[in-house]
Image: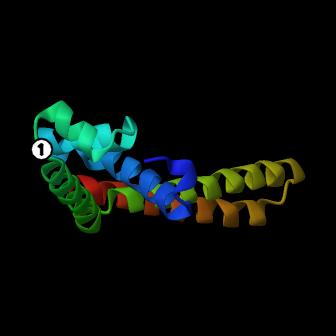
Amino acid sequence: MTVLFCGDKMVEKLVEIGILFDFYGKLLSEKQRTIIDLYYNYDLSLGEIGEELGISRQGVYDTLKRAEENLYQYEETLKLVHRFYSNIEELEHLHELVLDIEEECKSGDSKRLLEKINILKKALKIIIDSSQEVVN
């Protein structure tokens, strides 16, 4: 599997599976984790993985597909990756807001400063609530 020559869809899938694996890999069976790791991280072919693990190429393929389906299902159910990226986006927005507040402090416009602080508090509350949903 040579990613550079497989087109954008292969690169997208490689990144997508890598991210899902980072979040949910521990939920897979040891065999599924090993096969995902060898296929996506070590770039081994199905045949090479089969030789390494002592199983058929078809067995590797079936396990790989099942593991991929599990990763997608975990995300569909738990949405941890979605929440992670939403929180990053919101934090970037908050960073910009803090910079704006800093500028407002320098200019001394307290009404605009209070408006921005309220926006900041609401956005922080959203992130806190979203993070607590993951725990609950």
Q: Please, what secondary structure does the residue beneath circle 1 have?
A: loop
Which quadrant of the view contains residue 76? Answer: bottom left
Residue for badge 1: 29
The percent coordinates of residue 73 (x first, y second) are: 23, 65
Residue 36 placement, left or right of 12: left
Query: What residue do we see at 56% from left, 53% from top?
Result: 5
Residue 36 placement, left or right of 106: left
Query: What residue do we see at 81% from left, 55% from top?
Result: 104
- What amino acid does circle 1 point to? Ser
The percent coordinates of residue 61 (x first, y second) are: 21, 54
Q: Which residue lies most toward the top here?
A: 52
The percent coordinates of residue 71 (x first, y second) are: 25, 57
Residue 72 placement, left or right of 88: left
Query: Which quadrant is the C terminus positioned in?
Result: bottom left
Seen from the viewer's position, the closer of residues 78 and 113 is 78
Seen from the viewer's position, the closer of residues 131 and 13 is 13
Query: What residue do we see at 74% from left, 53% from top?
Result: 101
| Crowd class of label 1 (few under 14; some 14 to 19; many from 20; radius 10 Å) | few
Total residue callouts: 1
Which quadrant of the view contains residue 112? Answer: bottom right
Seen from the viewer's position, the closer of residues 60 and 88 is 60
Q: How is the image coloured?
A: rainbow
The percent coordinates of residue 96 (x first, y second) are: 71, 54
Query: What residue do we see at 43% from left, 52% from top?
Result: 14
Seen from the viewer's position, the closer of residues 106 and 63 is 63
